[in-house]
Image: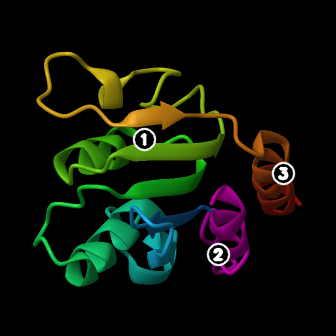
Amino acid sequence: MVRAALTVARTAGPRDVPIGAVVFDANGRELARAVNAREADGDPTAHAEVIALRAAAKVHGDGWRLLGTTLAITVEPCTMCAGAAVLARVDRVLFGAWEPKTGAAGSLWDVVRDRRLNHRPQVRGGVLADECAALLDEFFAAQRD
């Protein structure tokens, strides 16, 4: 599932950080995929996870509730995206690279497992971490050149 997110991350525009997100239903069928589009859309909320969750909600069949779904992401979600996964009732979050500066699934914060919230998805981080981190490293190295 994270490999699918890696595939979509590679389609990011030249100015957008290459982060990909894919939502799967309980049977492993892909519901939606998205890539970061903050720069392309001029929208601070256009993170891959938010775009993918919005699209998945349109096809999942339970309104905004994404019960039974898995959100696969190339990078640990930020607070906004972790919160969106919780509020969407995603069952499982899988991600690749850890993000110690902004991560909200165990690094800097742990929004997805906060006991004060009424929904806590299962979380597994570090899936294909090296591949996911390499994609980010390449992007940021090119930005510095």
Mark 2 or 1, which is nearer the eye?
2
Q: Can you give x and y, in whole percent of width and height, for residue 138 in the image?
A: 86, 57
- Indicate left or right for 85 with 16 as reference: left
Which numbered disc covers residue 131? 3
Instruction: Look at the image and say whether residue 11 sits in the magenta stretch.
Output: yes
Q: Is residue 45 above or below residue 12?
A: above
Q: Mark 3 is on which residue type?
A: Glu
The image shows residue 122 at horizontal and vertical percentages of: 41, 34
Q: Which residues are magenta?
A: 1-17
**Whole-percent x and y of residue 66?**
24, 61
Q: Secondary structure at mark 1?
A: loop
Callout 2: SS = helix
Q: Amino acid at mark 2?
A: Val
Q: Name the side, left or right, on which 62 lies relative to 98.
A: left
Q: Position of residue 110 (x, y in %)?
A: 38, 22
Q: Is residue 58 above or below residue 112?
A: below
- At horizontal 10% and vertical 72% (from top left) the residue drawn is 63
Q: Is residue 18 visible?
A: no
- The dot on residue 78 is 1
Q: Is residue 70 magenta?
A: no
Residue at 84 percent across and 51 percent down: it is 131
Residue that numbered label 2 is attached to: 8
What is the tally of numbered marks visible in this picture? 3
Instruction: Identify the residue at image location x=40%, y=21%.
Output: 109
Image quadrant occupied by the N terminus? bottom right
Seen at 89% across and 61% down, the residue is 145
The answer to which quarter of the image holds residue 125 is top right
Residue at the far top: name it.
Answer: 115
Judging depth in this view, the residue of 111 and 47 nearest the camera is 111
